Amino acid sequence: MTHSVSVDIVSDLVCPWCWLGKRHWDQARKLTADIKVETVWRPYQLDPTLAREGRPYKDYMREKFSGAEASGRWKAMRDHLEQAGPAAGIDFRFDDIAMRPNTMDAHRLMRWAGGQGRTAEMAEALFSAFFAQGRDIGDRDTLAALAGDAGLDSAVTADLLATDKDEKAVWEEELFYRKLGVSGVPTYIFNGRFAVSGAQEPAVLADAIRQAVKEPAETE
C-alpha cells in the first residue's frame, strides 16, 4: 500500500521560527522516507500593514518590543533561537539585519516557485538571505537574484515583480488560513484534518506525518 499525505506549511519569510521549522521539517521527512508527502507552502504575513518599502529593522523591533517586559521576551526568544539554530545548521545573525521588509513580494516569489516545483529551494534561499546574510528580501532586485539562485529565471521574475501579478491571489490565500484560525507560524496542516503549530522537533513532525496516514483527507 502506498501512503500519501498532504501538508500545508503556513509561514512567513521573516519568521525565524519558520526557518527553524523548515529545517526540522526536512529532518522529519528523512525519518518518514517511506511515506509519500506533498508539501505546499502557504503565505502568511506577520505584519501585513507594513509599508511596501519596509522599515529599518532595529527601529521596527524596538517599537514592536517596547517596554522592559516585551524587550526581555524578545531577548529570551533571540537567545533561544541562536542556541537552537546550530543544531539545525542555521546561523542566525540578527545584528546584521538592516531592514524589516514587507513580505508580499517574497510570497509572490514563493508562489511562482511552487509552479516550478522549487518552493523548498526558494524558501531556503529567502530565509538564508534574510537571517544569515542580512539582505533585504523586500527589494525586488534582491528577490530576482535569489530566484535565479533557486533555479528560476531571474529576468522573468524581475519582470513579474514589476507588476501586481498574483498579489490578489496571495492576499486571498492568506485570508483563507487566517479564517481557519491560523494566528501564528509556522503552522503545519495535515490532510486538511489537523494542525501542528510552532517549530516542533523533527520527531514530533514525523509522528504527525504518521498520524496523517491514518487520517486521510476527505474526498468529495
Image (spheres, rainbow, N blue to C red):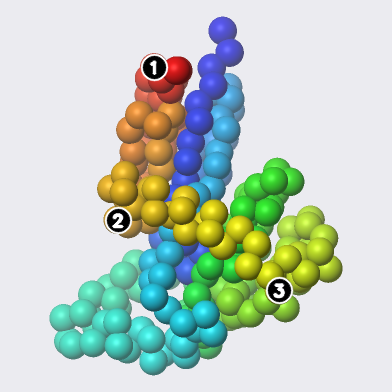
Residue 117 drawn above or below residue 92: above
The image quarter containing residue 59 is: bottom left
Point out the image quarter for the C terminus: top left
* Residue contact at pointers 3 and 1, CB within 8 angstroms: no
Instruction: Pick the residue in front: 166 or 9.
Output: 166
Q: Which residue is mark 3?
A: 162
Residue holding disc 2: 183
Element on which disc 2 rests: loop
Amino acid bearing label 2:
Ser
Identified by mark 3, the residue type is Ala
Sooner in the amino-acid sequence: mark 1 or mark 2: 2
Q: x, y (%) of residue 115?
A: 69, 46
Q: Residue at x 23, y 87 (%)?
A: 66
Residue under pointer 1? 214
Secondary structure under tag 3 reads: loop
Q: Residue at x 47, y 50 (%)?
A: 173
Rendered location of residue 211, percent (x, y) = 37, 24
| Quadrant in the rendering for residue 164 | bottom right
Q: Position of residue 65 (x, y in %)?
A: 27, 82
What amino acid is found at the position of numbered circle 1 in the picture?
A: Lys
